[in-house]
Amino acid sequence: MNRSDLTHTFESGWHNCRHWLVLAWMILSCSQGSVQAQLNVVTKRQFLEFGLVGGTMMYQGDLSHNYYFYVNYKPTFGGFIAYPLNEHFSAKLMYLQGYIAGADSNALEVPIQTRNLDFFSDIHEWSIQLDMYLLRFNSLKEGSSSFSPYFSTGLTVYHFNPMSTFTDPATGLDTVYALQPLGTEGQGTSAFPDRKPYMLTQVAIPLEFGFKFTPVRYLAIGLTGGVKLTFTDYLDDVSTTYVNPEILINENGMVSYLLSNRTWEVTENGEPLALGNKATRGGADSNDYYGYLAVTLSYLFIPEYKFNVSRKAGIHCPKF
């Protein structure tokens, strides 16, 4: 092979090799762009926040007496799942289970003590809420605040069932009765056709405020509290007036009457006070409400992996 043939062979080989190098570069560019696109899809997917709630629940109504406010506070616990929409808003689904109670025996006024009504009820609630952070909050992103106060509202569906314990004076045995089926204020009687049995599952408007901070990445601790504005005055089964004894006994039963007018348990002679249809039993001018104060502990979970993805690559798949 002479010099000219060798030169021609080299130039031909380089020409073919150059095509292969260009093709390899294009494949690498496309692959990198594809990988980057996949990573971008993952990073754009919002993380989920799983949390636990523990604290205390209280209620305000006809049988709550603020002189002994601490006796109205009962334990509550639950959990939530939150989906951050951005660094200022987060959609949240929360469940809470709590306990509320009230008794006239905690009042200071003698007339209220003589009324002698009491109740207790479990609360089961499911809420869908929008948390609104006042500061940019994202514990997964550098530069965002690790602390932020927030406000929350939405819609709550809750279930309650007011009950009371009746002690039989003859036997001394205690029996727990659900109050709603008894119609203690004449619900279902001919004397009060407009008084219908109240629903035990209802809706409320939550108004809550709290703050949250992240001591370490992926972990958030907070304090939250608020009220649930209900549309009922019967959380405690007390709202309007007494009912004439003969009507309540004949139509709703003796137990209904004995738990409607419980003055007989505290009078000296053991006889109930004469309280009929027009005698005030509760205040119907405002609805009852309940609220809670709790600590939250949550974990921020990212599907598939937990690391920050690098910035977008400067190499793009070439166009043809």
Image (cartoon, rainbow, N blue to C red):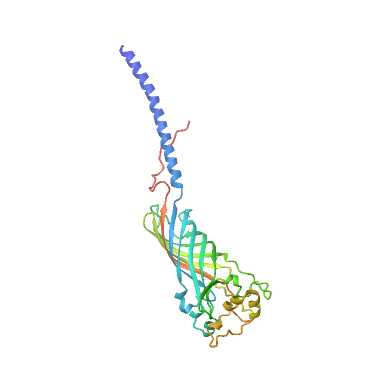
Q: How many marks?
A: 0
Give 58 or 120, whichever is nearer the viewer. Answer: 120
At a point 39% along the width and 29% down the height, the residue shown is 24
Q: Farthest residue to the bottom: give it.
A: 269
Give 208 or 280, whichever is nearer the viewer. Answer: 280
Q: Relative to residue 187, is residue 279 depicted above or below?
A: below
Residue 226 shows up from this direction: yes
Residue 307 x, y percent position in the rendering: 38, 47
Q: Relative to residue 281, is residue 130 depicted above or below?
A: above
Q: Relative to residue 232, is residue 84 depicted above or below?
A: above
At a point 42% along the width and 31% down the height, the residue shown is 27
Image quadrant where residue 199 sits: bottom right
Residue 64 x, y percent position in the rendering: 51, 76
Quarter in which the N terminus is drawn: top left
Q: Farthest residue to the top: give it.
A: 2
Residue 259 x, y percent position in the rendering: 57, 77
Residue 244 shows up from this direction: no
At a point 54% along the width and 68% down the height, the residue shown is 161
Residue 98 x, y percent position in the rendering: 48, 66
Give 94 or 1, whichever is nearer the viewer. Answer: 94
